Amino acid sequence: MAELAGLEDPKARAVNERHGDDHGVNLGALRALAKRLRTQQELACRLWESEDTAARLLALLICRPKAFGRDELDAMVRDARTPKVHDWLVNYVVKKNPHADELRTAWSADPDPVVASAGWALTTDRVAKRPDGLDLGGLLDVIEAEMKDAPDRLQWAMNHCLARIGIAHAAHRTRAIGIGERLEVLKDYPTPPGCTSPYAPAWIGEMVRREQAG
């Protein structure tokens, strides 16, 4: 904890706070520290219990993802309120855990929109990598009915799923683009030059174009 405190950078904190993250540690420095520590499950659990955001990010880098039980991960995702901790928990830990699909199903229908966004993130991963068994048309039904009025983080996760369905599954592409065009979610999102817009029709079109060109 003392070493993490020593890595605190006011400029990094200012940038992170604009994105809802309450820490000031450069992520490159955090990864370097994690590389030095290597995997230490017990230390990771102690760092998580500190409730400090930088410590929790470090914990997610040095933990053993398959060591967590289902209920532990459920409690952790409900306690991970800052965006970066939530994102790393889902992507670096839950996706590699044997309970991931069970949690995906449970979380997607959770009344807490932050928890539900974790479920949708796991669904997006399956849409891209292991779509067998998923009802893609049913997912589009839910997105069409609920995404427009969903809270920001849940809306972002659902939009990502919409785009991934359109990119990865040609049979559903026209409908996915049509839903995006009707709902206009993130249509005006500020996108830096050279970056792909998160607006689903533009995102789908650009990624399909790249795949076809490549």
Image (cartoon, rainbow, N blue to C red):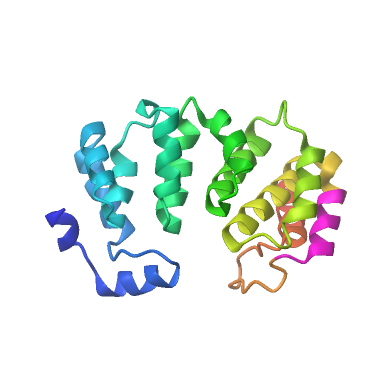
Residue 87 locus on image (x, y percent) = 47, 50
Over which residues does the magenta segment extend?
A: 175-185
Q: From this viewpoint, which residue is outermost toward the left?
A: 2
Question: Which residue is found at the position 86% from the left and 56% from the top?
Answer: 178
Number of numbered discs on residues: 0
Q: Main secondary structure of the magenta part?
A: helix
Q: Quadrant of residue 184?
A: bottom right
Residue 14 locus on image (x, y percent) = 34, 74
Let me know if residue 45 is in the magenta part. no
Question: Which residue is found at the position 62% from the left and 61% from the top?
Answer: 151
Residue 18 locus on image (x, y percent) = 43, 73
Q: Is residue 8 above or below residue 178?
A: below
Question: Which residue is found at the position 31% from the left and 36% from the top?
Answer: 63
User: Would you say residue 153 is visible in this rendering?
Assistant: yes
Q: Is residue 195 above or below residue 84?
A: below
User: Would you say residue 88 is visible in this rendering?
Assistant: no
Question: Which residue is found at the position 16% from the left and 53% from the top?
Answer: 1
Q: From this viewpoint, which residue is outermost toward the front?
A: 111
Q: Quadrant of residue 188?
A: bottom right
Residue 6 locus on image (x, y percent) = 15, 62
From the viewer's side, name the closer residue of 33 and 80: 80
Q: Is residue 139 above or below residue 180?
A: above
Q: Seen in the image, is 58 located left or right of residue 18?
A: left
